[in-house]
Amino acid sequence: MLASALLATIVFVPMDDRPVTLQLPVLLGRIAGRSVVTPPRQTLGHYLQSGSPDAIIAWLNAHAPPNASDLVLSTDMLEYGGLLPSRTPEASYATAAMRTREFALLRAEYPRAWIAAFGTVMRLAPTGIPAIGPGSTYFASGATWQYLWEYANLHDPLLPSEEARAAQLRTLAGPAFDDYIADRSRDLAIDRFLVQLAAPGGPIDRLVLGQDDAGPVGIDVPDRETLESDVARLGAQERVSIEPGADELGMALVAHALARGANWQPRIAVRYSAPDGASAQDPLEYGPISVAIGHLIVLCGGIEDEVNPQIVLFVRVPGTNAAHDDAFIAAMQSEEGAGRSVALADLTYLEGGGDPGYAVQGAFAQRILADGVATHLDAYASWNTNANTVGTALAEAVAAGAGRRTGTYDDLAHREFTFMRFVDDYAYHVDVRPLLNAQLTARGVDHMILLPPDDAAVASENRALLWNGAQSILAQLYPNYHIAAMQITLPWDRTFETQIDVGIAPNLRE
């Protein structure tokens, strides 16, 4: 199996073209020395422009590598044209269902491949888009989104105390309300179809449906319960999971494919920074963080093993105090000294939201960079939801471990991935993004859609600030390396994310 894995390709269809969903899964393959190929970039859409499912399906049938050992496919992209379009009325149920039947054809074309699919249970509301520029024609932009979001956060069924407000919100939302409810119904029907295709004997070997941003109460709860009932009725528990998260699912399944290629089931232990860390709650997830973490270990191809782990996942949680941090760092150093792979997921960004979390997260990043702990990490992530952060860190550590076991590990690619995470999660989200947003807010500019001339000006300032931050980080993280090339962009003309394409190289010896 190992010999074939060195040549075989992973075919990957992302949920959209953001860095976290497209760039990072491909880079995981580089770390492990495996090729991860994707459809042509123009077929994937861009922000409010939907991708082209039919063009992607044509590419899968005519141009995808015939020797592919694994197919990891976003159902949101294949059915609707991406994550954002999956929340809009753009595609009918009939169209989405027709595209979903492609899985049976792919099974016939790739009879020995591992076919994995990932989709989402629609979140509480559509994408929040200001009613300006391209957002002016979005079906639920501006105040309409706020009405839908508030409605979606009510109980289902409604509590008596909620009924009057619910009726008012339905009126305020206007025609978009009916579209929103129809979208939810369509998405649920397609997700139920996917569960059938992943039942024993079906064409999908592994299916994960991530509960996109949603808490323990809301209109999504009956959808999730229906899907869980379907999984149990079909006896598909070993092949289908429904769990918190969205953006990290592609990375996790690519990591799983890499582990499969190495004939390896990683043994993973979890260490929290505080005694009650497992019970911490991300407000955008329906259970304590331990629920998502447990699911992600399995989704990455691993098994939880607290006694004899190969990877130790350190999870820093909100509420961690100075004494906890001291013990936490000492434990990481001990595991690193023992030769174990150490992955760090810092969730303190969630601490109170905004500035309090930034300060806590940033101070810890500075500390582990300064004392050398960061240099020996196999993985680092520290921004976005619990599932997004943990999924990124676990996938990176699994990719590195898989590459080491097949003899194809790329140390430079691994360093670049970790460096990018510090620049993005720490320098950008802790230091640069809050500054950019404050400047835009002071001028009355919405940072979710940057129009000319603000788009070019903000992108330029972001590049200048991040270049300085990146060079400072690299000097501490890998002091014997320098930046050979780096491109910094705001890929969706908003400040929510940045994209960093970087090449580093060892310093020349004098």
Image (cartoon, rainbow, N blue to C red):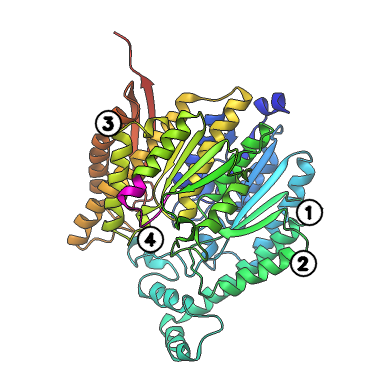
Residue in the foreground of this view, choosing between 54 and 252: 252
Quarter-wise, where is residue 308 in the image? top right
In this rendering, does residue 245 appear at all? no
Q: Is residue 350 left or right of residue 66?
A: left
Counting residues from the start of the chain, the first of labels 3 and 4 encountered is 4
Residue 463 in the image: state x and y as whole percent: 27, 39
Residue under label 1: 202
Residue under label 3: 471
Residue under label 4: 134
Residue 166 in the image: state x and y as whole percent: 46, 86
Q: Which residues are magenta?
A: 316-325
Distance (Cα) linking label 3 and label 1: 50 Å
Counting residues from the start of the chain, the first of labels 2 and 3 encountered is 2
Quarter-wise, where is residue 37 in the image? top right
SS category of the residue bearing label 1:
loop
Amino acid carrying mark 1 in the image: Gly
At x 29% / y 42%, what residue is drawn? 427
Q: Where is 498 relative to 224, above or below?
A: above
SS category of the residue bearing label 2:
helix
Counting residues from the start of the chain, the first of labels 3 and 1 encountered is 1
Residue 227 in the image: state x and y as whole percent: 67, 67
Tag in front: 2 or 1 = 2
Residue under label 2: 233
